[in-house]
């Protein structure tokens, strides 16, 4: 699957859900500002759906909130479905491999420190987290 790296702000509080088999999942949307703006216009944003699973999903719901600035590294995938009117639709979403919160947004979200995690066991302790300076390039 195509890899991508995005940085944006959560548009709403993430919600933890579970599959019928009990696997934790969290889907949330981020607003990603475009890197350019036409003269005299505000910079536009794209709204991207992000999917996380298992401990990563639990971690996002615990430490990130609406407005948190998050850097996401993941795989772009498409999914076909039928809407309530019977029309075939395609959803585009990023399945997150790992992520981090910018220190510029500390205090804007649910946490007072800067978390980062992948689909690995998440331990308690700030030393397991990565700080991203929003003035620098993304670390991936």
Image (cartoon, rainbow, N blue to C red):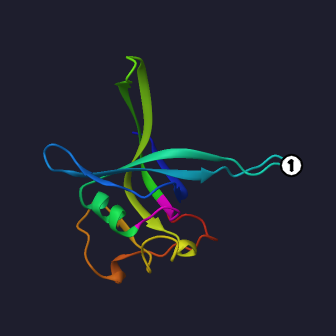
In the rendered view, tell whether residue 85 sits above or below residue 24: above
The residue that label 1 is drawn on is 39
Measuring from the top left, give residue 126's x and y in whole percent.
Answer: 36, 82
Q: Vertical placement of 14 versus 117: above or below?
A: above
User: Residue 68: percent from the left, percent from the top?
Assistant: 50, 65
Q: Is residue 68 magenta?
A: yes
Q: Would residue 18 be found to the left or right of residue 3 on screen?
A: left
Characterize the magenta stretch by its predominant secondary structure. loop
**Which quadrant holds residue 58?**
bottom left
Number of marks in the rendered image: 1
Which residues are drawn in magenta? 64-71
Determine the residue positioned at 30% across, 82% down: 125
The quarter of the picture where residue 1 lies is top left
Q: Is residue 97 above or below residue 117?
A: above
Counting from the top left corner in percent of width and height, residue 30 is at 51, 52
In front of the other: 109 or 98: 109
Say which of 57 and 73 sits in front: 57
Q: Secondary structure at mark 1?
A: loop
In this view, which residue lies farthest toward the top? 86
Q: How busy is the neighbourhood of tag 1: few (under 14 within 10 Å), some, or many (20 plus)?
A: few
Residue 98, x across and y down, in percent: 38, 59
On whether residue 120 falls in the magenta region, the answer is no
Give 129 or 105, whichever is nearer the viewer: 105
- In the rendered view, does 38 fall on the left or right side of 137? right
């Amino acid at each position: 699957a195509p890899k991508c790296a995005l940085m944006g702000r959560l548009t709403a509080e993430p919600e933890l859900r579970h599959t019928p088999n009990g696997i934790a999942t969290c889907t949330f949307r981020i607003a990603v500002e475009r890197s350019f703006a036409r003269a005299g216009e505000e910079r536009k944003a794209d709204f991207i759906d992000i999917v996380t699973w298992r401990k990563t999903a639990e971690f996002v719901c615990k430490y990130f909130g609406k407005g948190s600035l998050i850097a996401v590294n993941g795989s772009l995938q498409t999914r076909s479905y039928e809407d309530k009117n019977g029309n075939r639709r395609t959803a585009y979403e990023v399945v997150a491999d790992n992520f981090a919160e910018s220190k510029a947004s500390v205090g804007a979200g649910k946490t007072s420190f800067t978390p980062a995690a992948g689909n690995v066991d998440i331990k308690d302790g700030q030393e397991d987290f990565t700080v991203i300076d929003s003035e620098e390039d993304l670390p991936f």
